[in-house]
Amino acid sequence: MAFKARDEDLDDTIISQPLVSLPTRYTFLCKVYRARINLGGFQITDDGFQAFYTRFDELRQIAVPKCGGATQDCTYRRLVDIIELLRTPGASRAEVKRVVSDRFTVRLPISPLIDLAASLLSLVFVSGPVAAISYDDPVIWDDTMILGRPMQLGQVSLIDAIFRRPPSGTDSVKLPQSFTAAHLEKIGGIQIRWTHNLADHLLLRDDDTRLMLYHHVSVLQLQDRADSILPAGLAEETIRTMSLLMPPSLGKANAWFQQEQRKHRLDTSVGQCDRLNSSERQIDNFHFWRERLVLLKRTYDEAEPRSLSQLWWDDRKKTQWLTFWVAVLVFLMTIFFGVIQSTASIVQAWASVKALRTQN
């Protein structure tokens, strides 16, 4: 059944307090993303968006102390109202700040609330020119720039600047079935780091030794709507990159992701994405993330095994892999039979000496 949001569920809770009940959490999500959430598959104690709420609470706890007494005048309904202002086409940060300031009776800093609302709506860590919230690598939002939809042609929003859709490139790379996050770690030596910041998705860091992966698929599925401030097709393409790197096995999350999910409490929906077929894995099917996928694939292809375990898993060049391990097997067998032959010779010599002594 579909869950219908009720405004009164959000009117009595101020943002300095967490949202505890499952119905209230879903009400908040429905209002933030203008969505209708199907609760038919959930038990009353389950929460399909637990990973999202865990991170939201962390951001909320960072923002609230920065606002001082202003949070006593800010309920979750007020936060939703700020988000609706951010959806206004052509509204700059300065204009949103002015309108929000007029609605609050307490004259205290409200920039952290605007940053919190913008980060929640855009799935990107956003901060003003003077960072009011210490998010991880926030995207700076200038007072004169709009967040989402432009009002006139030629106007560029912050979201469009982050997720620009580059022209189709001429890079020719293949994305085989073996191009997975598990192989990136086991073969390429690239460590996977999970992020809550959509702007960091598929970003290589630390001299191309760490890969950032966004994992909030449940919220991305809500974004794939006409009234989302994200560029059309971005949410769906992001989900397909997760299907590419973490393909399910027999309709369930693969063993590698299950281990990662338990360790880092990730969104379980990641492992339930549809498996991509050969045509869907073509690089030409990716636009927003094309450049990062090309760079990742080249980094992976150029990586040389540095340990025996990487050598064992590295079957990218199957003929060389087979030749190498056959040579290793022959070498080990040579040593093994050499040891046996040497041992037999020593035993034979010892037996001969002992027989001579017995005869004397």
Image (cartoon, grey):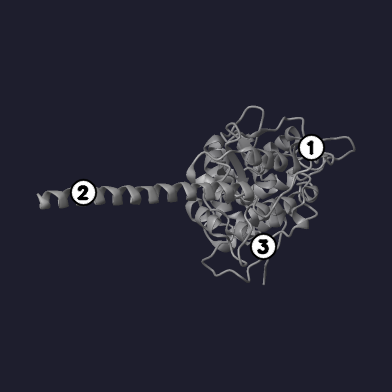
Q: Position of residue 237 (x, y in %)?
A: 74, 51
Residue at mark 1: 157
- The alpha-carbon separation of the residues under discs 1 and 3 comes to 29 Å
Residue in the image at 69% along x and 45% along y: 122
Mark 1 surroundings within 10 Å by alpha-carbon count, few (fewer than 14), some (14 through 19), many (20 or more) = many
Mark 3 surroundings within 10 Å by alpha-carbon count, few (fewer than 14), some (14 through 19), many (20 or more) = many
Residue closest to the eye, 240 or 355: 355
- Specify which label sits upstream in the sequence, 1 or 2: 1
Circle 1 or circle 3, nearest the eye: 1
Total tally of numbered discs in the picture: 3
Label number found at residue 5: 3
Q: Position of residue 234 (x, y in %)?
A: 75, 49
Residue at mark 2: 350
Left or right of 334 in this view: 288: right
Mark 2 surroundings within 10 Å by alpha-carbon count, few (fewer than 14), some (14 through 19), many (20 or more) = few
Residue closest to the eye, 320 or 40: 320
Check whether the beta carbons of the residues at disc 1 and disc 3 lie within 8 A of each other: no
- Specify which label sits upstream in the sequence, 3 or 2: 3
- The alpha-carbon separation of the residues under discs 3 and 2 comes to 90 Å
- The alpha-carbon separation of the residues under discs 1 and 2 comes to 88 Å
Residue furthest to the top = 130
- Specify which label sits upstream in the sequence, 1 or 3: 3
Residue furthest to the right = 153
Left or right of 210 in this view: 201: right
Check disc 2 and give the amino acid type.
Trp
Vertical placement of residue 326 versus 7, above or below: above
Residue in the image at 34% along x and 50% along y: 341
Q: Position of residue 267 (x, y in %)?
A: 58, 55
Vertical placement of residue 40 versus 339, above or below: below
